[in-house]
Amino acid sequence: MKIKFLGTGAADFPKEWCEGYRRTASALIDDTILIDPGPWVIDAITKMGIDPKRIKYVLNTHRHEDHFDESALAFLCSHGAEFIEVAAGNTITLDGYRIDALRANHTIPCVHFIIERDEKRMFYGLDGAWLLYEEINAIWKRGVDLAVFDATIGFIDGDWRIFEHNNLNMVLEMKKSLKDSVKRYVISHMAYTLHTDHKTLEEEMKKHDITVAYDGLVIEF
């Protein structure tokens, strides 16, 4: 399985994207399944040389504007993609992929995904605070090869946004609790106004064996 990060930022990133910044968060699984058709998806697809005709399915975590854009979705569907909505608690299969939608801890209805194919599993959990018990239990029971965690807030403590997003100390605590249930940890959805530069963040998280995603990063597992 392969994940390509089309965007790794939160809603506060500059409106005009340029090198060194992050687009709003979106990801592409095996060049086939796109998660979150946000406002910078078309830009990412174009500049990264991705053929939109290869994208067969579009999933959405929730309807916040940095994760869902009507024009981006229309662009993908015009090239043959199918928009699939999966409610929390449901499981679907698409071309050999099993996709479980799990209720996320966020301000509006939001889901996280466990995506499985050929005995490889990935957890994609952007936007949300502490993982809910159903999510933790699913990861404990099944194990995942790769987990992508929300890391909106950085190392800021005592911020009101921790009720809908993670700070990095929350990510570290969940990593301790999940222990060997996850083989590799990645963070994404970093807020421009709440984080240091990428290099500094990367050096800090390397101490905890956590990968910091950036736009264009590809991970195969």
Image: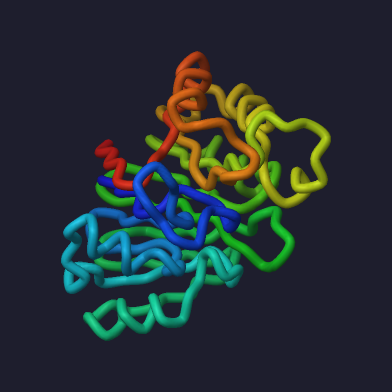
Residue located 49% across and 23% down the image: 200
Q: Is residue 33 above or below residue 195?
A: below
Residue drawn at the location 80% of the way across and 40% of the way down: 159
Q: Residue at x 70, y 42 (%)?
A: 130
Q: Which quarter of the rendering shows the C terminus?
A: top left
Quadrant housing the N terminus:
top left
Name the residue nearer the viewer: 203 or 139.
203
- What's the colour scheme? rainbow
Left or right, 98 with reference to 170: left
Quarter of the figure with residue 136? top right
Q: Where is residue 40 in the image (x, y as percent from the top left)?
A: 40, 64
Query: In the displayed structure, would residue 114 be above or below residue 208?
Result: below
Q: Point out residue 214 in the picture as x, y percentages from the top left corner.
A: 39, 41
Q: Name the spot of residue 70 as percent of width and height, x first.
A: 46, 81
Residue 127 vs 206, above or below: the answer is below
Q: How many labels does the image show?
A: 0
Residue 42 percent coordinates (x, y): 32, 69
- Residue beneath the point at 37% across and 59% down: 98
